[in-house]
């Protein structure tokens, strides 16, 4: 996690779970920075995915940081166990937190970096009171709950807003974008200020995931180097 680097976080939601360890090692060797773990409970979003034990298993196969995205109700019940199993960063949804500030403190007490996200229809300024304490804000550019959706370009205004606040106060360190990320949309997100990208189908759905990841990184680096926003 070098300063100024655009971090690529392949999402295992789109991986082949019958070969998950191999899939993760493949993207690790291709230069992935983090592994993104989407956790869904069938209540906050209409789908079910994985639990803490998957994070534990993945930690046995890769040294990459576990970027855990909790799309669940009552996240306070599960944050300690995800942290215990090896999560490096835990992101909760503002809409699922009765007391967001307490959730952020809990994540940090458990030894993890703290992230927060909002659904596309939720104004990003709902996070204003918490930015000083957050390490990461996750901008959803699709509706949470399913992989393979199309990128929502109007969500880039949230990325710009966060970049402006970061310039004033230094927080959050990471502005992460998740949903419909490919080589084209990655460039758009980075141009607006994103420095962490979640990609699932664009990587694991490609014939050669390693090649797809390298293409995504190339596009992000090109956007950061030659088309920075002021």
Image: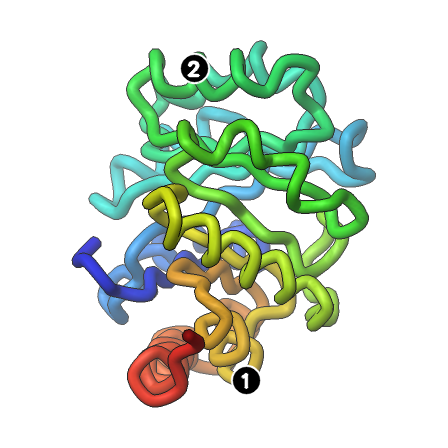
Report the mark closest to the observer, 1 or 2. 2
| Residue 87 visible in the current orientation | yes
Residue at 50% across, 44% down: 137
Vertically, is 133 above or below 101?
below
Vertically, is 154 above or below 91?
below
Mark 2, secondary structure of its residue: helix
Quick one: label 1, few (<14), some, or many (20+) residues within 10 Å?
Answer: few
Q: CA distance from mark 1 to mark 2?
A: 36 Å
Kindly indicate whether the residue at mark 2 contacts the one at mark 1 (C-beta within 8 angstroms): no
Residue 165 image point, x, y percent: 47, 49
Residue 228 image point, x, y percent: 38, 79
- Which image quarter is the C terminus in? bottom left
Any mark on residue 6, and which?
none
Residue at 53% across, 17% down: 101
Mark 1, secondary structure of its residue: helix
Q: Quadrant of residue 94?
A: top right
The residue that disc 1 covers is 184
| Furthest residue toward front | 168
Vertically, is 171 above or below 86?
below
Residue 17 image point, x, y percent: 53, 50
Report the side of 185 relative to 197 (left or right).
right
The residue that disc 2 covers is 105
Q: Quadrant of residue 132?
A: top left
Residue at 57% across, 13% down: 76
| Furthest residue toward left | 2
- In the image, 204 versus 110, the foreground residue is 110
- In the image, 128 versus 186, the foreground residue is 128
Quick one: label 2, few (<14), some, or many (20+) residues within 10 Å?
Answer: some
Display colour scheme: rainbow
- In the image, 171 versus 141, the foreground residue is 171
Report the side of 80 relative to 182 (left or right).
left
């Amino acid at each position: 996690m070098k300063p100024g680097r655009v971090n690529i976080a392949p999402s295992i939601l789109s991986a082949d779970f019958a070969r998950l360890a191999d899939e993760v090692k493949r993207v690790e060797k291709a230069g992935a920075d983090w592994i993104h773990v989407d956790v869904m409970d069938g209540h906050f979003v209409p789908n079910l995915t994985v639990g803490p034990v998957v994070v534990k298993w993945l930690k046995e196969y890769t040294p990459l940081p576990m970027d855990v995205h909790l799309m669940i109700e009552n996240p306070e019940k599960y944050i300690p166990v995800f942290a215990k199993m090896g999560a490096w960063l835990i992101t909760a949804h503002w809409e699922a937190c009765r007391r967001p500030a307490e959730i952020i403190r809990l994540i940090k007490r458990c030894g993890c970096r703290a992230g927060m996200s909002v659904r596309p229809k939720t104004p990003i300024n709902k996070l204003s009171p918490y930015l000083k304490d957050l390490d990461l804000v996750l901008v959803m550019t699709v509706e949470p709950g399913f992989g393979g959706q199309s990128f929502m370009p109007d969500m880039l205004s949230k990325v710009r807003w966060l970049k402006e606040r970061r310039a004033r106060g230094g927080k959050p360190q990471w502005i992460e974008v998740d949903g419909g990320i490919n080589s084209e949309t990655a460039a758009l997100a980075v141009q607006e200020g994103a420095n962490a990208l979640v990609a699932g189908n664009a990587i694991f759905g490609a014939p050669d995931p390693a090649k797809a990841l390298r293409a995504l990184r190339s596009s992000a680096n090109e956007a950061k180097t030659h088309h920075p926003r002021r």
